[in-house]
Image: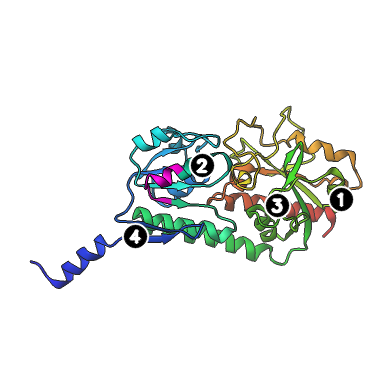
Amino acid sequence: MWTVSTSLAATALAAPITVTDDSGATVTLPAPAHRVISLAPHTTELIYAAGGANAIVGAVNYSDYPPAARALPRVGDNKALDLEKIAALKPDLLVVWRHGNVQRQIGVLQALGIPMFLSEPKQLPDIADNLRKLGALMGTEPVANRAANDFTARIDQLRAQYANRPTVSVFYQVWDNPIMTLSGGHMVSDVIRLCGGRNVFASLAPVAPTVSTEAVIAANPDVIMTGRYGDESGKSTKSDKNTADATNDASHTHDAASAGVMSADSNTKRNDDANTLPKSLDRWKAWPQIPAIAHDNLFAVNADWMDRPAPRIADGAAQMCADLDVARAHLGK
């Protein structure tokens, strides 16, 4: 039997879905998206975490988490997108990350009228915000909101746990030739702050600045950290472990690429030994006067956890916070 209430319910179901993406653009869909394509590894993780396992139909290379993502059709990489394949998959939503080489192609996709959500989280709360918005766009709000709340709770717990720890200064190395780091505008710096650390290059203007050896020595960091690929264990790696015979391990990461560094989509050689440090940190042992060297405070964190702005950064944050506590003990703080 038709009633006013059933009419209102039908109207509500048919109402368009509108959210604001990370560029400030309004994204409106007539109905929940059920053919979603991810154009960055971190957005693949966000889509799955937001409940989109049944909606995602394609992704770029190196979309490797969760494991189910590895079976998705590939639509390109950080160098070029396969526009024909994207069109053939008939997406009703693209979740994109705007950067260097594919900027022009994203413009072409916009001209085709395919709805597009730009995901570019800058700080930890932005991850929960992205989850909720993607859940709204895919009609998976209960799953997405639960994931967002769980993520926020984990970050809040870490913040409370480490809020009163003595501050330690941190140099986070993302590449070693040339030496590159991350400034205060990057999410990794947000994690350093969360753990009671201070990013020694937080004040630099570029998000991913190149720095000199002399600048690092002058910064006199208590801790030197880098990212390491191929580590799903979450183990802390200390500088007194045996160094693996792996090269080119510095964090060429997906999110750093948004700041002008090569992304995780690149063919970076990976170190699968979770108990060793990347050889890219060995260079600093030539300056034993640096506190990080004098006090045995070289660390590597799981790069996939740390450098993709997605829920697993909470795992990376827990790892970094634990490492900084080890560093404090070494420093006598």
Name the outermost residue toward the top.
Answer: 245
The residue shown at (44%, 42%) is 108
Indicate the quadrant where residue 57 lies. top left
Check if mark 3's residue and mark 2's residue have beta carbons within 8 Å.
no
- Residue labelled with disc 1: 291
- Amino acid type for the residue under numbered disc 3: Pro
Tag 1 or tag 4, which sits nearer the N-term?
A: 4
Q: Is residue 110 magenta?
A: yes
- Give the CA distance from mark 4 to mark 1: 53 Å
Using the image, tell me which numbered label, if any, was put on residue 243.
none
Residue type indicated by callout 4: Ile
When the figure is inspected, residue 186 is found, relative to residue 273, above or below; the finding is below
Mark 2, residue position:
104
Q: Distance between the residues labelled 2 and 1?
A: 45 Å
Q: In the rendered structure, are the residues bearing label 4 and label 2 in contact, judged by CB atoms less than 8 Å apart?
A: no
Circle 4 residue:
17
Badge 3 element: loop
Q: Are marks 3 and 1 in contact (CB under 8 Å)?
A: no
Separation (CA) of disc 3 from disc 2: 22 Å
Crowding around mark 2 (Cα neighbors within 10 Å: few <14, some 14 to 19, many 20+) is few
- SS of the residue under disc 1: helix
N-terminal of the two: label 4 or label 3? 4
58 vs 288, nearest the viewer: 58
Nearer-the-camera pick, 169 or 154: 169
Residue mark closest to the camera, 2 vs 1: 2
Q: Give the range drawn in magenta.
A: 108-116
Name the amino acid, label 2: Arg
What secondary structure is found at the residue carrying circle 4? strand
Q: Do the residues labelled 4 and 1 touch (CB within 8 Å)?
A: no
Which residue does the numbered mark 3 point to in the structure image? 206
Residue 176 magenta-drawn? no
